[in-house]
Amino acid sequence: MTELPRVSVFTLGGTIASSGDAGAAALVRLSGNDLLRAIPQAADVATVDVRPFRLVPSGDLRLADLLELCTAIEDAAAAGADGIVVTQGTDTLEETAYAIDVLTGLDVPIVVTGAMRNASLPGSDGPANLLAAIQVAASDVARGLGALVVFNDQIHAARHVRKSHATSTATFVSPLTGPIGYVVEDRVRILSSPRGRFRISLGEHAAEVRVAQAGVYFDDDGTLLRAVPGLGYAGLVVAAFGGGHVPAWLVPVLATVNEEIPVVLASRTGAGELLRGTYAYPGSEMDLLRAGLVPAVSRSTSHATVLLRLLLMAGVPRDALAWCFEQASDPAGTVVVSAETRAPAPASQGEDQRRAV
């Protein structure tokens, strides 16, 4: 008889672990074993090892929790787990899945899932999502792809995924790529594999840092942006208009902030790559990049905030940040960055160098 794959399920709480008594609002209270009892079919897919980790709404998760979780995931893989599943709330799932992706370098599948409808509601999606996640984690075709998000029978690369709707069970999307695969019946299909792997090595004594995130809005006066360095933040991610634009009067504000702490320029739209050479008017992307801001490239604001924080914690030099964001958006093979990382010198002068800024 063929031995089933071994899958470790780490439970963190969230809607998938929430239920309410008749007529009452839901609370986070279901254990991992409670979740598994709803999917007896999982016993035919894998030998499942439930590992209770946290029992909280995902908004209460901290980076320290994720660092501990990543260590636990690596330990489970070293002990023989063929796949990993993480269940949690969806509110911060796009950030946590991305953090797991850049902090772990395992080949075993790491699959993050959850639910949009708690267990008390008709049509609760938690059981189906958990079963599909276990199927993907147990599948050889999902190996070596980095962290994945499985929701609504779709498989997304954590590096591309976003939560796009407040209540829909189809909330998770990958605007740039679409899902990389799907689950149907007991079959796991991978249609396209993410290119390369990008990983951050924090080292044993990484210091905790805080990074601010601020959205630029219509008729913004810049008061909040000016205050960021004085509040103790080590970096700032700006969610700018469109392809990377702000009101003209905010350019000197951001330039001044950037002299004190690194400022990453992202788009508030949530999809698409930041422009770098299309518009030259005051407040345009070219104006801001000339002021020294770091382009987020294709990283969403939420992913850019996670990425900047981890890069600073790792001690990556400031002059390597732009190169790291480029590599995180489109890794050239396997890229591991740390305090020793140095950005490669431009291959040539002139136009190629200007485009690399």
Image (spheres, grey):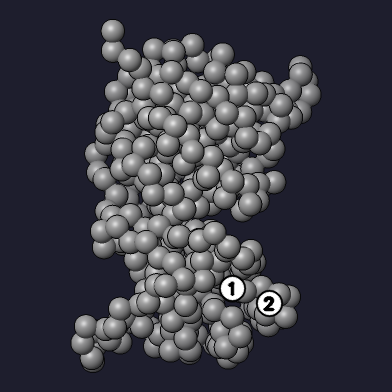
Secondary element at tag 2 = loop
Pointer 1 residue: 236
Report which quarter residue 296 is drawn in: bottom left
| Vertical placement of residue 67 versus 228, above or below | above
Amino acid type, residue under disc 2 in the picture: Val
Residue closer to the observer: 282 or 231: 231
Secondary element at tag 1 = strand
Amino acid type, residue under disc 1 in the picture: Leu
Label 1 neighbourhood size at 10 Å, few (<14), some (14-19), many (20+)?
many
Residue under the image location 21 percent in, 83 percent down: 347
Residue under the image location 78 percent in, 24 percent down: 24
Residue closer to the observer: 303 or 285: 303
- Which mark, residue 228? 2
Residue closer to the observer: 173 or 18: 18
Residue 128: % across, % down? 47, 23
| Vertical placement of residue 351 versus 106, above or below | below
Do the numbered discs 1 and 2 sit on residues whose CB atoms are within 8 Å? yes
Measure the C-alpha gap from mark 1 to mark 2. Answer: 8 Å
From this viewpoint, which residue is outermost toward the right? 24
First of labels 1, 2 by sequence position: 2
For this view, does 155 lie left or right of residue 190? Answer: right
